[in-house]
Amino acid sequence: PWSLQDFEIGKPLGRGKFGRVYLAREKKSKYIVALKVIFREQIEKYDLYGQLGREMENQSGLNHPNVLRLFGWFADDDRVFLILEYAHRGEIYGVLRRNGHLSEKQAATQYIASLTGALAYCHNEKGVIHRDIKPENLLLDFEGRLKIADFGWSVQTTSKRHTMCGTLDYLAPEMVENKAHDFAVDNWTLGILCYEFLYGVPPFEAENQRDTFKRLKGL
Ligand code: ADP
Ligand code: MG
Ligand code: MG
């Protein structure tokens, strides 16, 4: 079993709603990884047990060149640590920011093809729906290869689900309306991202959530 003693901790790589992520190196092998830290206090406060459990279980079972590997985990008295593959070039969001938008060729061959392949693998071979695909959760390795990250909202399923989750700009209508949903919610997001890669902004972006909601329902 791993412990914090096994790692040298480096610079912060990013943070999400609950997680802080640091560069780290395993002392013996010198292998570079990313350590995602979640405080137990937060886990209790926001009741994240289910989420964290699914993140560990679902992501560790996935082995695909375009899915970020989860190698293992450990905990101490006040934190849980996830040992992740390091994505050297960070979020795809950064590429979009720097370039405004991408060319059709780059969007198609570099990103949409990889994302499609990875989703097909998760859906068809592993029965896992990600449910939170967005530019902050799509990372790039040292060669610029796309990696799907952050399986906190994922579920393993063959039947329809009912929990609403994710970020409004990328949510499928059936999810917004709190109806039953399935693998198709990730595929909807693929369409949203395809638009965003080409135009630089997601298609239903608006001043506030209420207007985004109206736009995505075609009102
Ligand atoms: P949360 O579940 O809180 O959203 P994430 O797993 O999405 O946390 O991580 C938060 C941010 O940290 C990401 O958006 C990304 O910028 C950075 N990050 C996460 N994992 C890695 C990684 N393996 N390599 C590099 N950066 C990462
Ligand atoms: Mg995230
Ligand atoms: Mg998460």
Image (spheres, rainbow, N blue to C red):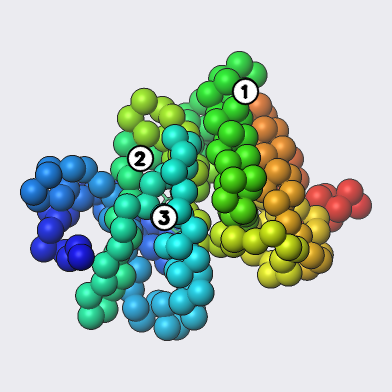
Q: Furthest residue to the top?
A: 105
Packing grade of label 1 (10 A; few <14, some 14-19, many >=20) is some
| Residue 53 can be seen, yes or no | yes
Q: Is residue 127 above or below residue 199?
A: below
Q: Is residue 186 left or right of residue 41?
A: right
First in residue order: circle 3 vs circle 2: 3
Of 104 and 35, nearer the camera is 35
Q: Is residue 14 left or right of residue 74?
A: right
Of 217 and 155, nearer the camera is 155
Please tell me whether mark 3 or mark 2 is closer to you in this view.
Answer: 3
| Residue 102 can be seen, yes or no | no
Q: Furthest residue to the right?
A: 219
Q: Residue at x 41, y 55 (%)?
A: 60
Task: Name the residue tied to disc 2.
Answer: 87
Q: CA distance from mark 3 to mark 2?
A: 16 Å
Q: Residue at x 33, y 45 (%)?
A: 85
Q: Amino acid at mark 1?
A: Ala
Determine the image quadrant of residue 68. Answer: top left
Task: Name the residue tied to disc 1.
Answer: 108
Q: Residue at x 21, y 43 (%)?
A: 32
* Residue 76 x, y percent position in the rendering: 22, 75
Of 87 and 68, nearer the camera is 68
Tell me: is circle 2 under 8 Å from ligand 1. Answer: yes
Task: Indicate the secondary structure of the residue bearing disc 1.
Answer: helix
Q: Furthest residue to the front?
A: 125
Task: Name the residue tied to disc 3.
Answer: 60
